[in-house]
Image (cartoon, helix red, strand yellow):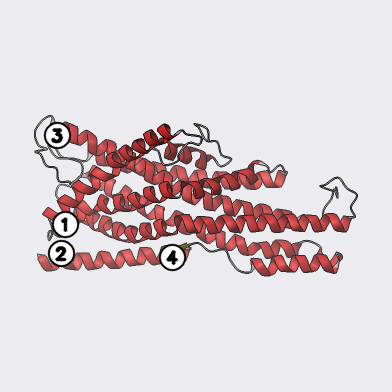
Amino acid sequence: MGFLLKQTIGSLTVSLNVVKLFGLLVPGQLTKKQRTMFMWYQISWYIYMNGIYLIVQAGDLFLIWGDVPLMVSTSLLLFTNIALGMKIINVMLRRSAVQNIIDDGEKELANEDREEGVAIIQSCNRETSQFSNLYIFLAATTVAAWATSAESGDLPLRAWYPYDTSKSPAYELTYFYQISALSTSAAVNINLDIVATSLIAVCRCRLKLVNLSLMNLCKGPFVSTNGSHQTVEEIILERVKACVRHHQAVLSSARQIQRCFSIPVLAQFTVSMVIICVTAYQLVVELHDTPINVVRLASMSGYLLCMTLQVFLYCYQGNQLMIESTEVASAAYSCPWYLCSLRFRRALLIIMIRSKRASQLTAGGFTTLSLSCFTAIVKASYTFFTVLQRVEDRQK
């Protein structure tokens, strides 16, 4: 693994390099001493951007327990950091499996030379780049708004520290730490999500390439791949076997994605329901404050949109993977199978029967990644939001 990673999918290139910069992907061919140094590099980054935040925000939550508005304000980033910590640890533990998924997908996309295939890859690249750019823009706007939303003498985020943060230079140093750690953790969180969703998008792209191969099974030129003299029928059967191998490879990658990211996605979805709820609640609180802090309002709005988009990306990609995995049968049926031999028809029928079973990704085995799952999460968040409002009304 070189210092800079280059992938066919642009969003994956950027995200993998950012993730590697913060020590989550280990470079290959390291000596024992280098691995030890790299381990401390990983630990240092983790403590700086996530570990300290978890301690100081958990401490603040303990001190203000029972005060619903303050608890909501503190828990905004606390739950996000908990989910981020799980994702970081997961990638560090499963980095070899993740790297295998990346390498398998890149090998197939890089070797594609058909004009229609290149167009499919470019379409996938545009889609993932658009989602990634929107996600990064919302996150950057939210962090910038948070950095400038603090009142004079206050810190941008609620937290407990074992020293007086109102005095100089403790105030300036703590202010700098909060913004720098927030920016760093946001960058890592965003790019981990982009890596996971882009890998799903790569599986979708590979399925489309399989579909293209199936539709063109009976189209020339009929040239033997091994250099021997073969009949047209034998060449077509070899193409069918190649399609089966590619199809199985894609399904294997999807299963690996399920194993690597299923539990972190479940944690993220669980946390996202709470975060969307408390962010909406905090937004309502800000709207009722007099005078209204416009920058603070913008930061809350941006954070709400970020969390919603985060869930949507996983659900959208999982939903499209299900749809496109079942379209393999239609692609196989679209070739002129009725002109071919019985042996060919049987081979094609096996592919069609297998593709009727959709390739599904789940969040911890509890819920399938789909648009209906996204709708359910939003509905659950709204339910929690109304409950939270009722609790506050009773306390008044």
Between the residue at mark 3 and the residue at mark 1, the CA separation in whole angstroms equals: 24 Å
Q: Nearer the viewer, residue 344 or 245?
A: 245
Q: Which disc is residue 338 wearing?
A: none
Amino acid under disc 4: Cys
- Which residue is label 1 attached to? 69
Q: Amino acid at mark 2?
A: Glu
- Contact check, label 4 and label 2, Cβ < 8 Å: no
Dot 1 or dot 2: first in sequence order is 1
**Residue hosting label 4:** 373
- CA neighbours of label 2 inside 10 A, class few (<14), some (14 to 19), many (20+): few
> Disc 2 or 3, which lies upstream in sequence?
3
The residue at the point 15 percent across, 59 percent down is 68
Q: CA distance from mark 4 to mark 2?
A: 29 Å
**Measured Cα–Cα span from mark 2 to mark 3:** 32 Å
Q: Position of residue 322 (x, y in %)?
A: 56, 63
Of 248 and 322, nearer the camera is 248
Task: Mark 1: give few (<14), some (14-19) or many (20+) Cα within 10 Å.
Answer: some
Relative image position of residue 186 (x, y in whole percent): 34, 43
Compared across the picture, whether 383 is left or right of 123 comes to left
Nearer-N-terminus badge (4/2)? 4
Closest to the observer, 48 or 171:
48
Q: Earlier in the sequence, mark 4 or mark 1?
A: 1
Q: Residue at x 32, y 53 (%)?
A: 304
What residue is disc 3 on? 171
**Nearer mark to the viewer, of 3 and 1:** 3
Q: Which residue is mark 2?
A: 392
